[in-house]
Image (tube, grey):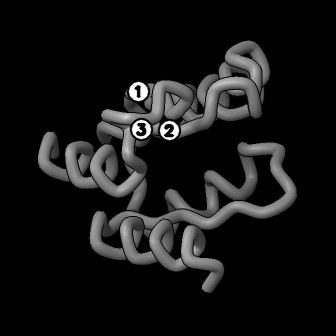
Amino acid sequence: QAYRYRLLDEKLHRAVNPDMHVRFFRTFSRDAAVYYVDGLISTDFMQHYLLFPLQNAAETASSGEIAGCIRQRVALCEVEAFFDVREIVAQLVSDLEGG
């Protein structure tokens, strides 16, 4: 799992960007991470509306069920769930390039 986080760190330039942070947690009996830009979201908001609902989610679920649970539990306008690190990186790079 550590290589996945290193890859995301590299693609998000965390080594040279002091405002890019990561928060690790467990949900659905899996390790998870939230990457965020300091100042664009408060830690209280993130804890209350994102991390707390996910950390208290059902402990066992399939990937499809997890995506549905995230959409139900997280009070955001739009939720996309990605489970493959290659897919996550491709989406990030595409968004950063305006694609």
For this orientation, the residue located farthest to the right is 77
| Between discs 3 and 1, the one toward the N terminus | 1
Judging depth in this view, the residue of 34 and 71 nearest the camera is 34
Quadrant in the picture for residue 36: top right
Indicate the position of residue 27 as horizontal and vertical percent values: 43, 36
Indicate the position of residue 16 as horizontal and vertical percent values: 37, 35
- Describe the element under mark 1 as helix, strand or loop: strand
Q: Residues within 10 Å of mark 2 (few under 14, many from 20)?
A: few
- Left or right position of 14 against 78: left
- Describe the element under mark 3 as helix, strand or loop: strand
Mark 3 vs mark 1: give the one in front: 3
Residue 25: assigned label: 1
Q: Which amino acid lies under the numbered mark 1 shown in the image of this protein?
A: Phe
Residue in the image at 54% along x and 64% along y: 81
What quarter of the picture does the N terminus occupy?
top left
- Describe the element under mark 2 as helix, strand or loop: strand
Residue in the image at 37% along x and 64% along y: 83
Q: Residues within 10 Å of mark 1 (few under 14, many from 20)?
A: some
- Left or right position of 44 against 10: right
Residue 33: assigned label: 3
Q: Circle 2 is placed at which residue position?
A: 34
